[in-house]
Image: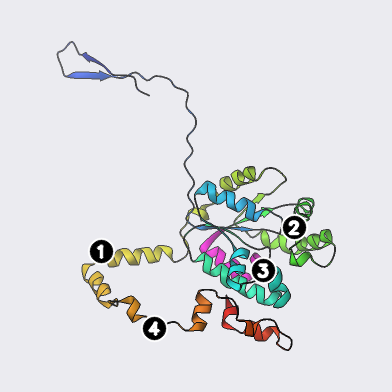
Amino acid sequence: MLVPLERAREKSGGDPVEIGTARSTRRTASVQRFVPIRTIVLVGLMGAGKTKVGRRLAARLDLAFFDSDHEIEKAAGETIEEIFANRGERVFRDGERRVIARLLGQPAHVLATGGGAFMDATTRALIGRRGVSLWLRADLDVLVARVSRRGNRPLLKDGDTRAILADLIERRYPVYALADTTVDSSEGSPESTVTRAIVALASCPLAATPPDGEEQRRRARRTRLSDPRRAAADRDRRPRDSAAAAPAPSRHRLRRERRLPLPRSLARQPGRSRDHISRHPAAAW
C-alpha cells in the first residue's frame, strides 16, 4: 500500500517529481478463483460420498447440483429400488444413460452419478466429451461403514455387504481409474475432501476446456451476429408467434417431456410383462 506522496522539485528547476514510499503490510496470499467450464461429474462406488461431497462442492464453486439417481426417480415416478424390482436393472441402466445425457447438455454444474453409470461405455464417452470426471476413491472399510447406515441399496439386498462391495471394487475400480482426476474420500470431514477436489480440478486442464462442439457453436453465433444480413435472415425465418406456430403436443409427448408417471392401466399388474411396461413412452424417461 502506498502512503501519501511527497512532492519535491529538482534543483535544476524542472517539473515536479512524485516520490512514493511503500509501507510494508502483512498480506495473505491471493488465490485465483477456480471456475470450471465443463460439468464436474462425480463417479465412484456407493458410499463414496458423491452426493454429500457434490452438494458442498457445488456450493463452494457457486454451481448448480444434480444427482442422477434423484433425476431418474423424478422422471420415472418411482424410486430406484422400485425400478429395479418392477422393471429390472437393464431398464434402469437404459434410463440412466438417457437422463445423464440430458443433464450433460445443460450449463456447467456438479453432477453426482450412480455407481454403475461410469461403467457404461456410451455414458463414459459422453462424459469425456461434455464434462470432467472426478473419481471419489474409498477403501472397503470406509464403504462398508457408510452403506450400513442406509438400507435402500438394491445391489446390496441379497448377500453379504462386505463381499458384494469387495467384488464391485475388483470389477469397477479399474474402470473408475479412467476418470480425469482422482481424490481419496476418507473418513475425514467432507469439507476437506471438497478442498482436495477443488485443488485436483484446478490442476486438470480439461476442466478449463470448453466441451466438444461448444467453441464451434460460439464461433458460428459470433459470425451470424457480425453479419447484419445473416442476422436479419435468421430473424425473418423465425415464426412470428411461436406459441401459435407450434402444434399442440400429444399426450404421449407430454408424458415424455414432462415426465408424467405411468397411467394406472399400465401399472404393474398380473399378466402384464415388464417389457410391456418398458415399451410405454413414459418409461423412456
- Pick the residue in front: 207 or 242: 242
Residue 82 percent location from the top left of the image: 70, 72
Q: Residue 101 vs residue 16: left or right?
A: right
Task: Estimate the spatial distance between the alpha carbons at disc 1 and disc 4, rounded to whole Å.
Answer: 33 Å
Secondary structure state at the residue bearing disc 1: helix
Q: Which amino acid, by three-letter code, is at mark 3?
A: Thr
Secondary structure state at the residue bearing disc 3: loop
Q: First in sequence: mark 3 or mark 2?
A: 3
Q: Which residue is mark 2?
A: 150
Quarter of the image where one finds residue 215:
bottom left
Secondary structure state at the residue bearing disc 4: loop
Are the residues tagged 3 and 4 within 8 Å (C-beta)? no
| Quarter of the picture holding the N terminus | top left
Are the residues tagged 2 and 1 within 8 Å (C-beta)? no
- The stretch of residues the image draws in magenta is 117-132
Q: First in sequence: mark 3 or mark 4?
A: 3
Are the residues tagged 1 and 4 within 8 Å (C-beta)? no
Residue 78, can we see it?
yes
- Pick the residue in front: 283 or 199: 283
Give the residue displayed 47% in from the left and 43% down from the top.
Answer: 33
Task: Estimate the spatial distance between the alpha carbons at disc 2 and disc 1, rounded to whole Å.
Answer: 56 Å
Q: Which residue is mark 1?
A: 226
Q: Which residue is mark 3?
A: 79
Q: Residue 21 vs residue 47: left or right?
A: left
Q: First in sequence: mark 2 or mark 4?
A: 2
Quarter of the image where one finds residue 46:
bottom right
Mark 4 crowd level (few <14, some 14–19, many ≥20, 10 Å Cα): few
